[in-house]
Amino acid sequence: MNNMVENKLDLLDKKILYELDRNSRQSAAEIGKKVRAHRNVVNFRINKLIERGIIREFVTIISPSIMGLVPYKIYLQLQNFTETKEKKILELIRELPVYWAAKVSGRWDFIIGLLVKSPGELNEIKLKILNTIGEDIVNKSISVLVEAPYFYREYLLETKHPAEIKYWIKSLEENKLDQKDSQLLKILAKNSRASILDLSKKLNLSVKTIISKIRRLEKMKVIADYRISIDLEKIGYKFFKCFISLRKASKEDVQKFIDYCHANRNITTLVECVGDWDLEPEFEVESSEQFNKIILDIRNKFSSIIKTIETIDIIKEYSYICIP
């Protein structure tokens, strides 16, 4: 790791971030046993990581398909992209069912991730975007996400064996949630580390009922995971994406690429989509040189199936809680 990371994170910080990335609902005592530190020390370190802005959010990963939602992304290329226009876009997306948005550098200027129930709802959102900033849009693209296998941040500790592959979307049957389930998810979505006692008080339910509900939602895969959102710049890392168009690809070919991404510590997500391209790997790297080296390796190893690769730099992420 580079000097900037070493100066800002010591080994204990890295161990704590690593554990929170794998399960951000773990108690300080549970993390303490794994990192060999007292729970008070773990709590102190977590609070410091929050104060320093390294940990932005404690995130609950909620499966969209089981709630009848489909994830889409809208990519916007804008003319004369200014701070004023950026503020206008941010005001707009706060009114939309956005799960993730980012200001980017490259062919596109903005990416907006949406969760909607139908193509009709997506079309209404598209029209709203056009009516608001249509005059500034030079080009746009829309893709539907098919699946998004993701991988834990193994680079934090340079572990020898990558953790299991997790999947965000999954093709699961929609399940009806009761009012308390929905309220519980809204609270956890804002803070995956919300205590059972706090949840009990806010929902006016017994501790036993809260525990039972969370276990049920986890078993149903409504709650897919508990993670953290990190300000990568503050730990000396950069965030890149690339858009890969395939010339041919069997299920076996795609699986080989997923396995490759899983084995590479700096690839954190692989989005499979239907749109103007087919795959969107995401990279968290120490430098542009490291990113370019990985891209070259991908080109060499998968030249038989890859037609084109387009890269972008994620300048700033905007995350929003989106549970209809």
Image: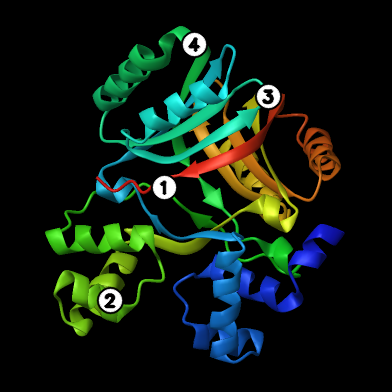
Please give the name of the residue rendered at 46% of the width and 82% of the height, measured from the top-left corner: 27
**Rendered-image quadrant of the N terminus:** bottom right
Q: Report the Cα–Cα distance between label 4 and label 1.
A: 32 Å
Q: In terms of depth relative to the viewer, which is nearer, 65 or 194?
A: 194
Between label 3 and label 1, give the one nearer the viewer: 3
Whether 253 is drawn above or below 217: the answer is: above
- The count of marks equals 4
Q: Report the Cα–Cα distance between label 4 and label 2.
A: 45 Å
Q: Earlier in the sequence, mark 3 or mark 4?
A: 3
Residue assigned mark 1: 169
Whether 173 is drawn above or below 92: the answer is: below
Q: Earlier in the sequence, mark 3 or mark 2?
A: 3
Q: Position of residue 292 (x, y in %)?
A: 82, 37
Q: Report the Cα–Cα distance between label 3 and label 2.
A: 44 Å
Q: Report the Cα–Cα distance between label 3 and label 1.
A: 27 Å
Query: In the structure shown, which secondary structural element does the residue marked by tag 1 occupy?
Result: loop
Amino acid type, residue under disc 2 in the picture: Asp
Residue assigned mark 2: 198
- Mark identifier at residue 136: 4
Please give the name of the residue rendered at 86% of the width and 60% of the height, measured from the top-left corner: 3
